[in-house]
Each structure stands twice: as structure tokens, then as C-alpha cells.
Amino acid sequence: MAMTDRASPAIPRGGRIRARLSRDDVIMRASMVMIALYLLITLILPLYVMFSKAFTTNTFDLSQYEVQVSNEEGEFENPPVNLAVLNEKLGVFGPADLATSSDGRLPVTRLFPDFSFRSPVKYRIHGTTPDAAMLVGSALHKGTEWVELDSNTFRRVVLRPKKERGFENFRAYFSTPALFNSIENSLFIATVTTIITVLLAFGFAYALNRSCMRFKGAFRLIAMMPILVPSLLPGIALVYLFGNQGIFKELLMGESIYGPIGIIIGSVFFTFPHAFIIISTALAISDSRLYEAATALRASPWRIFWTVTIPGARYGLISAAFVVFNLVITDFGLPKVIGGQYNVLAVDIYKQVIGQQNFSMGAVVSVVLVVPAVIAFAIDRMMQGRQVAMLTSRSVPYQPKPNPKADRAWFLYSLMIAVFIVGILAMCQFAALVKFWPYDLSLSLRNYQFDLMDGGGWASYRNSLKLGILTAIAGTSVIFFGAYLVEKMKGFEWGRNIFQGMAMLPMAIPGMVLGLSYIFFFNNPDNPLRFLYGTLAILVISTVTHFYTVSHLTAVTALKQMDGEFESVAASLKQSQLKLFRRVTVPVSLPAILDISIYLFVNALTTVSAVVFLYSPDTTLASIAVLNMDDAGDIAPAAAMGMMIFYTNAGARILHAVLSKGILARTQAWRGR
Amino acid sequence: MKDIAETRESYLEIIGLWKMFGDFVALRDITLSIDEGEFVCFLGPSGCGKTTLLRAIAGLDIQTRGRIVQAGQDISDLPASARDFGIVFQSYALFPNLTIRRNIAFGLENIGLSREKIRQRVDELLDLVGLPDQGEKYPAQLSGGQQQRIALARAIAMSPGLLLLDEPLSALDAKVRVHLRHEVKELQRKLGVTTVMVTHDQEEALAMADRIVVMRDGVIEQIGPPTEIYREPRSLFVADFIGEMNQLAAVAEDGDAVRVGEVRLDSRQHDFKPGEQVIAAIRPDDLIPHEAGHKPDADSGNCLRVRLREMEFLGSFWRCSLGHQSLGGQMLIGDFSVNAARRLSLEEGGEMMIELPASRLMIFGRDESEDGDD
Ligand SMILES: Nc1ncnc2c1ncn2[C@@H]1O[C@H](COP(=O)(O)OP(=O)(O)OP(=O)(O)O)[C@@H](O)[C@H]1O
Ligand SMILES: [Mg+2]
């Protein structure tokens, strides 16, 4: 009786089968590498360059050089002097003068007050370390060898900086209160806004999901409106409402709208729809059976609320909180318009780069800003994952029962929110049409003569349209195809994982940071892609990359719902994956594809943060024009342009709705209910 | 049966196949030969590796080690698109946005067929699966059984040398399933296409297969025609997995016999030493019923007087629970024809004599949960 061990036979060594790749495999892998390369070039490398800038200092290290000066006869009698010692004695250069950029040049003669290029005195200079570098004219000298020069040539000696990696820039940052105070400000604004928005949005979502009030459709529509405008538009409305000549100025009781109050109110406005969508989804998927059970147990409504509703929506609430937090802390447009003297991180980046041309400090602030953004992003992703896990084990949707008193209360509450949102937009529209606020309130279209103002005029609007359309087309194609590859490709596990990670990264990167990193990367003379700088193309690229993640996730979700064996069937029928993609995958995913397009279009029109560093005089954008006209004091035209964006996006959304409906109607037969 | 098998040529050879998912071994040294035109079922409990083996044959998830030879060609490392097979999945994977016609024609396009030829072929296939006028509908407008047939038509459209079916019937309700079983089998016979079907439904396997491959934990337990698998299971696992089986704890005795409780029973020939703990197994329908007063002949011992504890009418036969104090409290199940029940006037609480034919009493090692018996 052989008691053979089931574990035998042992796994043989060697002889592993290496699958041969089909043409499709090769095409798909190559395509994925291409898209990964796109993300590498438009995201990873720029960020890498920017981060390394933040951690690199270039300083002139005077102690690395010694100079010996001859007498009038050209004899070197005096001993060599170290330049650092000399500088200490003379106090010519302060620390600020010695901090420089990678292509800084420091003329040595400044340290020699008696220098005259006609003098017969000769100079010898050398480095004390092998790394010490200087230029004589354009010739580079490096190392410890002495160079002897007449005074006319010595005039042309410049020192080159020493490059060091480390936290020096951060030390500088944290020793400047004007800068690091912004961290607290940013955190404060983001936290307060998060609390207010999540509470308001929860109430609103609750009213829409759990009450029988009327006009739910209209409320839902209104709640989504803020998505259609740049985040700085509520700032403009607030200026008219509460600014120095505002209608309700007195309501602030002496406080200024320019500062935290304005930023918070505006932030609540533009983050509201984001929080609303997430919380509403969380409430919508909760299981009605739990409610029935709780009611059967005679739990009070209050108890049901705390033991069923809140736990059911908790991931949604947390996720919404971090999304809002992230949106606010990375937002640039609103604090720029209404922040006054109140500094926040995102605006600091702008000020450092555009105002002071201090790119490395811009990079440092960017790094500081990335930290909370990445944390918030990571927590949000985690929560979304759990929410999805809850979704799979479901459930009968909840059917609210009429309760006239509660329904009326919810209606009033929702009405209040709706008035707030519509009020902000209406204020902008009114201001845009008024001749001369607040003195001549008669209406005119004067403020629409954009060509008479700074900001690029109507060309900006046309550029924005172009950007929106190109972003929607190019972005949707690239992103959807990329998601398809990641979802449906066979094998190549590690490649797909890297790609997936890359696709998630953009969401964690604030627009300002992305924009600044593009300056570092694309505006580098050594970069063969430099020709992109200042073109519409780079605006399209930055926008696609900036909004990559959400689009990617939308596509992945749609693709996951498709039968996983289509590819296998196509392979068994000897048909190429590309044919399958064209004939089946794309048609079946058309609703998701439209969703991605409209998302990209709307965001391309409203975004300010990434593109503010990248536009050129030929490629000004409507959203940037709003910013610049406001900056120049043309607030009414800024409002007018902002509302143009609103109407355009609203139109696009309507078109999207019509198209989606058409597609659904046409494909009803095969979608089967 | 034997003659047919010998005239057939081996069409698919699987040699020393291994499949690893990380450290987990899903297939362990699988060797198997399938003849041309044969209908083979992979049968086994969930997770035993049936689908994994099928996908390796298709090239959809290529094995870690081992070779596969199809029609004389080594296809071990070929991608699916370079192999010759049609496949039907449990989900059918019909393209939802294409009409039935276009679904079936999907593989016929761009292989140099004229439109007219394609149309003819699709008509032919629709006829073949018995859905001649459903061509313009979409998959969502068909019933599950109809969709299944369309998936089959699509899979055989290009006349593949090998047809692979992964639980093609398991998404259907019981009645349709039984009906389609015959249709699929009929179609396969008509086309003469070598077919491999994965199933965990033993009835389906017994009804459809020319040969059954019983799998368990990534290894093949037994290969053979349905009757052989049923009559001559080579391990307790196979015996237990397919059909009903009485299992009695027993001790081996000298001379091809065992002792169950106090009773000595002659059994099939076995190699266990006297005193070894074994399992004696017999199928319920192998029990021969006799009236209570039956006198066993000298050469057919193995008769037990039992009490009918319970009787359950299962349509074509009675399933009876039988007790015998000398079996050490163990129960036997016996399936007796309606006829026999009437003839012997069986009733609950009554007594009867049963005979356990020595040739049907199989002996397996006690550690059978782990091992085969020989
Ligand atoms: N991609 C995979 N990664 C890791 N393990 C896998 C993978 N695919 C299958 N397995 C494992 O391999 C084993 C065999 O799986 P397989 O799908 O072949 O089972 P099966 O016999 O078809 O079962 P079922 O009847 O449930 O379909 C299972 O234990 C399964 O968990
Ligand atoms: Mg399976």
C-alpha cells in the first residue's frame, strides 16, 4: 500500500514556459508604454525636476578660492588671501548675494576695491578644492591650479556657484514668518471650509435622498452649478456683495470680506457640489432594510439617524471631507481674488514665481503644499475603497415616506442653499451688466467689450474653447485607451501596476505645483521639448494630466462592468483586440466616454492653477482673463467673462445630456432595460 | 467501445503541465491525452483547477510548465490568437451591442470571405442551433438558453478543431439545462469536433462525456468513460464525488474479505493486510434486495438481515435507510426499483434481507481522504 504523498511530485526546476507574445500583446504593451511615457514626461519628470530644485541650493562658496596679488612690478610678495576672509573684512557680499541659482556668476573684482583694469598689478587665483569652479571670460577653470592673469583679464573672472543638496531652502523658508504663516492660514481655511461644506452638503443630500420635498430635480441641478465656474468667480461676487462698495457691507459689522471670511464663503460655494455628490451617493446606496429593522425595533428617528444613517454614510462623509480639504488647500484663484493680505500656500507659490521670480522658493512652497494634499488624497482613496466594498453587499434602496412638516423644513433648508448658490451667480451676472457700479446701475453690454481691456480680450475666450475641445478630445482618447489597456491587458502585471500608480498620481498634485514643475521642466533650454513652451499644446497637456485621475477612474469603472471574457472570445476568433475595442468596447462605454469628455471640457474652461504659469500672450485663456482683469481692477468685465464661462459650460452640459439621452435611446434595444 | 477508441487518433496531448499562481500550485503535473472527436469533461469540486486547465489549453492563461500538443503541433507557448479553438464561457460573453448575426459573424469577417458567403454561413449556423429567425435581435432580447446557443454558434463558426466549454450550462435553470445537454451533445457528435467541457455537475458529465477527467486539488484523480468512473472508481474521492456511495468503516481480513462490525463480508480483491483499517464502499443501487426469509446460497454469503428505517420515494426508485445491529450502528442506503419494492412489499419498520455482491464491494484505505487505494 503506497501512501503516496499528495504534495509530490515536487515542482520540477527549469523549463518554465515563456509565452510568446501575439501581435495584439505587442501592440497593447507598446501602447501602454507610450501612455506611460506620456505620464512620465508630463508628470513624473517635471515633478522630479521641481522637487530636486527645492532640495538644491546654489551658493558662491568664497572659502573655496584664494587670490594672490602682485606688486606694481608684477612680483608676488604678499601671501595668498582666502576670498571668504577678504569678504569678512570688507563685507561686500551678504548671504543673500551669495545665494544664487544654478547659473549664477559672481564677479571677483568686487572684492578688490582698489582694482583697476589698467593697473600693472597681476593676479593669481586658484581653488582650494578640486570642485572650485570659475570662468575667465567664457573659459571654465576648475581645480586647484593657479591661474595668473593681468588686471585687464582678471576683470573678467567670475565665480561659479557650488551646488548642494539638502534642506537649506527649507531652513530659509521656515525662518521667514511671512512665508510659513501661510501654512497655518491654509490649514485654517481648509479646515473651517471643510466643516461648513460637509455639514451643509450633508443636510442638502439628506433632504434630497430622505425627504419627500418638492423640486428635488431643480435643487439637484442648482447644487451642481458651481462646478461650471472658475473658483475665483464667487470671490468677485463677494466683492460686490460685501466689498467696500458692497450691497450688504454692513452685515460684516466692520470685518473685511478681503481675507479669511471671503475665502471661506467662496470656498464653501465652489466645493459644495463635490461634497454633495459624494455624500449623496453614500446616502443613496444605503440599505433600506436597516431602516425597516430599526423602525420595527421602535428606535426613535434620532437614534436611527445616529445608528443607521451616519454609519452608513460615514465613508462618504470622510471622503467628502478630504476632497473638500484638498480642493480648498490647493485652490489658487479664490484667495488670489478675495484673500487680500491673508496669505495662503497656493498664492505664495504664485507670488514667489511671478512676483519675485524666486523659483526655488516657489518650489519649496510647492513641496510644503504637496504634503497635506497627498495625505488628504490618500485618505480619500482609502475611504472610497471601503465605500465600494459596502456597495457590493447591497441592498434595497430607501424609499422616503411623506412627512409634511419635515418635508417643509427640508424644503426651506434646501431653498436657502439654492438661494446662496444662485445668488452668487446672479450677483456676478448683474455686476457684469451694470454700467458703473454702484453709481450708475443702468444696464449695458459695455463690460463685454473684452478687447478693450487687459487679459487677452475675446481671443482668450476663443482660446479657452479651443483648449476645452482639444482637451476633451485628446484627453478622453488617451485616458480611455490607457484605462482599457490597464484593465484588459493580459500579463505584464508589474507594468500595469506602475501604470495604475502613475494614473492615480495627478489627483494628489495641486495644479499650482504641476504648473510650476512645467516651467522648470519645459522651459529648460536643454529640453528638446522646449518648443512646447508657450503653445496651446502645453496647456492641453497640462490640463489633461491635471485631470487625468478622475477621468481614468471613470473609465476603469465602466470597463470593469464589461464582461471580462470579450478579449478571450476575440482571441479565439482570431480577431484583433483593436477591432474588439472599436466595435464593442467603445460603443458599449459611450456613456462613460461622454462623461469623461464633459468633465475634461468643463475643467479646461474653469481651471486657473496649472495654466496660470503656462499661458503666453498668444494663448491667454478666459479663466486667466478673469484673474487678470480682476487684478487690473476691471472687476465688472472679469465677472462678465466668468459668466461667459458659466454659460458655455452650461451649454456644453446640456449638449452632453442631449447626446447621452440620444445614445441611450438608440441603444436601448441592446442594453435591455 | 474499445474498438472505437483504438481507431481514434490522439488530438490533444497534455504533458507534465504545472500552473502556479505565486506559491500556490493550481495544476500539478497534469498529463492527459484526448482523442480526435472525443467529448471530454473535466469534473471536480470548485477550485480544483478545471478552469485553469481549460484556459491553459486555450492559451488564455499559459501554464507555468509542461507542454501541450494539438494536432501534432507543440502549442505550449502560443498565444490564444494563434491556437485553433472555439470557446463558450459561462457568461456567454456575447457582444451586447451587436446583433446575433454580427456576433456570430465576428470571427468570419476579414478572413477573405465574401459578404454573401458570410451570410450563408451565419444562416447555416443559426439553423444548426435551432434559432433561424433570431438573427436581427440583440443578445439582451434572448433568453439564457438562446444566448447559450448563440455563443455556441459563434464558437463553432470558424470550424475550430477544438471546442472548449467552461460550465456552459450552469447559468441556466434546471429544465433548460437538461434539454440543452442533449442538444450540445448532439451538435458535437454531428460536427465531430473534439470537445472539452468543464463542469462541476457530475450528472452533466456522466450524461455528456465520452470520457471524464476527475480532478481534485490540481491533480487528476481518474480518467475514464462515465461507466468506468462510476463502476470502478479508483479512489474513495472519485467514488464519493460521483453518484451515491455507502461507506462503512471496516477492518481488512485475510482472503479478500473485511469485517464490518461483527460481520465478515467478502469483497473485491484487495491488498490490505489483515487488521488494517479500511473503508468498505458500495453503491446503493448495487444492493440486491431479498425478502426477509431469503436463504442465502453457500457461495453468495454477504447477506444481511436489516430493518427498513426510512423510505423515500424518488420517482423511479425507492431510497431506503437500512439498519443492522451487527454493523456497529452504521447505516446503509439502498436504492430499490419500484418493482422490487412492490414484489418484496417493502415498508418502513419492516425487515428484509440484502445482499452485498462481493464484486461490488470496494475497499479503500482509511486515509482515503488523502489517497487512492492501490
Ligand atoms: N488568477 C489567479 N490567481 C491566483 N489564484 C488563482 C487564480 N485563478 C485561479 N486561482 C486559484 O486556482 C485554483 C483553481 O481555480 P479554477 O478557477 O481553475 O477552479 P475551478 O476548478 O474552475 O473551480 P470552479 O468550479 O469554482 O470554477 C483555485 O484555488 C483558485 O483560487
Ligand atoms: Mg471554473
Image (cartoon, coloured by chain):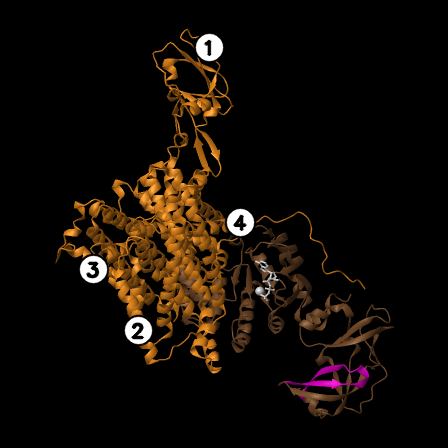
Chain colours: A orange, B brown
Q: Are marks 3 and 2 in contact (CB under 8 Å)?
A: no
Dot 2 crowding, Cα within 10 Å, few <14, some 14–19, many 20+? many
Q: Are marks 1 and 2 in contact (CB under 8 Å)?
A: no
Q: Quadrant of the C terminus of chain A?
A: bottom left
Q: Position of residue A501 (x, y in %)?
A: 48, 51
Q: Earlier in the sequence, mark 4 or mark 2?
A: 2
Tell me the CA gap for discs 3 and 4: 60 Å
Question: Which is more N-terminal, label 2 or label 1?
Answer: 1
How far separated are the C-alphas under marks 1 and 3? 79 Å
Q: Is mark 2 within 8 Å of ligand 1?
A: no
The residue sitting at the top extreme is A73
Task: Same chain for labels 3 and 2? Say yes or no.
Answer: yes
Residue A220: % across, % down: 32, 67
Question: Does A73 appear above or below A344?
Answer: above
Nearer to us: label 3 or label 2:
3
Q: Which mark is residue A247?
A: 3
State the CA–CA distance, disc 1 to disc 2.
93 Å
Residue A283 forms part of the magenta stretch:
no
Upstream in sequence: badge 3 or badge 4:
3
- Image mark for residue A411: 2
Please, what secondary structure does the residue beneath circle 2 have? helix
Residues at circles 3 and 4 in contact by the CB criterion of under 8 Å: no
In the picture, the quarter occupied by the N terminus of chain A is bottom right
| Location of mark 4 (residue) | A494
